Amino acid sequence: MSDNSIMTIGRPTEFDRQEALEKAMDLFWRNGYEATGLTDLTTEMGIGRQSLYNAFGDKHSLFVEAMKHYASQNSQPLIDMLRAPGSGVENIRQTLEAVVSFMTKGECRGCLLTNSIVELAPHDEEVAEIVRSALNRLEKEFKDAVDRAVESGEISADTDTRAMARFLNNTLHGMVVMGKASASKAALKDVVKIALSKME
């Protein structure tokens, strides 16, 4: 046996950690936390159980990291729409309509964060904190867009911009739940229409 072969004995198989995390995130998103077992994860991620433990810790730690990755990756396009130059109202319209398109295109898995609110947040403080942080971040972006709409005269100066932002944030996540329940595009567009009418 050569020295090189001796050196490789017991060495953990190398893998792309980011790619493995993406695959874990996708599996949790499809199946939820409880329905996803360690065997499911190692098969999907293409790694051994010990490699999973070494790289991510236990299943819960992996889920928490997957949620943080999801929040960073999937919230940014919405935030970019809300921050875009121009009309605050139009930015809000485009953001809500993007959710309609996403929720009615192909297999609807909802939103990993929204799904986790129902499944884990009530009894898992670490998950609840991730969800709260993501919701607060999006609420702030809605408020900034509403504030710009007030400043430009698009909507009334006496608008309670924080309350409006909370309403819009709640509307967006409610649409995600409706979409997961196979609501039609027409039904979701009705929600957008009424939400925007509150800003007139």
Image (cartoon, grey):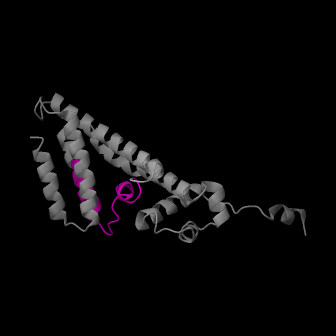
On the rendered structure, is 198 left or right of 45? left
Q: Nearer the viewer, residue 123 or 30?
A: 123
Q: Nearer the viewer, residue 86 or 109?
A: 109
Please give the range of residues in magenta.
94-121
Look at 29% across and 44% down and name the residue there: 81
> What is the chief secondary structure element of the magenta stretch?
helix
Which quadrant holds residue 139?
top left
Q: Position of residue 192 (x, y in %)?
A: 16, 53
Which quadrant holds residue 5?
bottom right
Q: Position of residue 151 (x, y in %)?
A: 17, 28
Look at 35% across and 58% down and name the residue there: 118
On the rendered structure, is 152 left or right of 80? left
Looking at the image, is 134 positioned above or below residue 183?
A: above
Q: Nearer the viewer, residue 22 or 128?
A: 128
Q: Position of residue 163 (x, y in %)?
A: 20, 38
Look at 42% across and 62% down and name the residue there: 29
Q: Is residue 107 magenta?
A: yes
Q: Is residue 145 magenta?
A: no
Look at 39% across and 52% down and name the residue there: 74
Residue 89 in sight in this render: yes
On the rendered structure, is 112 left or right of 189? right
Q: Quadrant of the N terminus?
A: bottom right
On the rendered structure, is 132 left or right of 192? right
Q: Quadrant of the C terminus?
A: top left
